[in-house]
Image (cartoon, grey):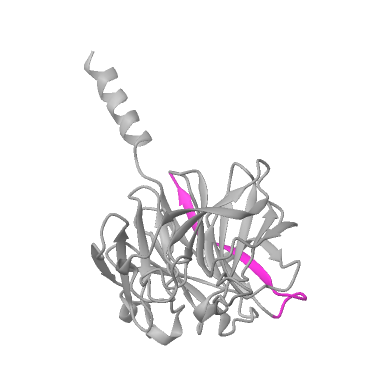
Amino acid sequence: MRTPKILLSITLLAVLQPVHAAVLVDAEVGIKIPLAQKPSTRPMTVAHIPGLKRYYIADGGLAPMASEFEAATSKSQIHAYDDEGKYVNSAKPGYDNRSIYYNPNSDKLETITYNISSDVGFSPNTGIYAIDLSETGDVKDSSNEVTQFNPAFGDAATMPSYNPETKQYYAKQERGNKVWVVDLKSREKISEIALDFTKAGVAFDDVSDHFVAYSGVKGEELVLLDVDHKAVLIFDLSGKYVGKSELPKNLKLRSQNHFNGTGYANDMLFVYNEPEGEFGTYYGFKVLKTNQ
């Protein structure tokens, strides 16, 4: 009777093992999304909602000063594309979007605004907001507040990524290797991750200044774009360097990719290739090959 119990234990152990991944030596193109219209402001990050089979690309730009004729709302739009990268629609919820992401805990498309860490001069459009969508996934102009400003996010231009398992955010700080870990219940960072740039062979001004992605893969959680060397760097949650995936050398990366034009969605790192197409093209790169 002991043998079946042992086999059952082994089977359960195998099923419960976390997903791991191997870093792909050369990044693989998973999708291309040519922008269908000129970005309303700067092109920022990308989100994906599997159930709706929609990608969302957000622009980001400061709102004009309020006047008696116009409210202080950003002209930045959010654009919807289908799973094949074809344009669906655009809307203007009125935020200076820095990060957008799908939150499976709330089942909402959420945006983090510029300067979420301060309420000086930017309230009431500063914080995290849930963007309304139609039943088919079209983006709407309306939204609801998730939270107002929170100083725990640090740098004004940070583009935080979201970990739905821990309900925490990873906010990269500019001009350095520090990533602040943020819980919305706290007004201070709960911890800090120092990415090992020495082992990765990069300096702070080689890489994307404001964005580090969360992959959801154990041991390879943090994904960072190396703009100068056209590569993608992988780190774990302790900041340890794991490896890198090479991007195509003919990819034209410009200053956009230091300050915006990146994202992580549907298990791909998105990179904005400005010269391709009339208004630029987002490439989705697979950099991790998952295994059970």
- The structure residue drawn at horizontal position 63% and vertical position 55%, both measured from the top left corner, is 55
Q: Main secondary structure of the magenta part?
A: strand
Instruction: Give how far across and how far down residue 244 sits, in percent.
Output: 45, 70
- Specify the quadrant that holds the C terminus: top left
Residue 59 in the image: above or below residue 54: below
Do we see residue 123 in this rendering?
yes
Instruction: Give how far across and how far down residue 194 sits, in percent.
Output: 28, 73
As rendered, which of 10 and 48 lies closer to the eye? 48
- The structure residue drawn at horizontal position 75% and vertical position 69%, both measured from the top left corner, is 37
Q: Residue furthest top?
A: 1
As rendered, which of 162 and 183 lies closer to the eye? 183
Do we see residue 287 in this rendering?
no
**Residue 289 highlighted magenta (yes or no):** yes
- Specify the quadrant that holds the N terminus: top left
Residue segment shown in magenta: 275-292
Residue 131 in the image: above or below residue 34: above
- Name which quarter of the figure residue 158 lies in: bottom left
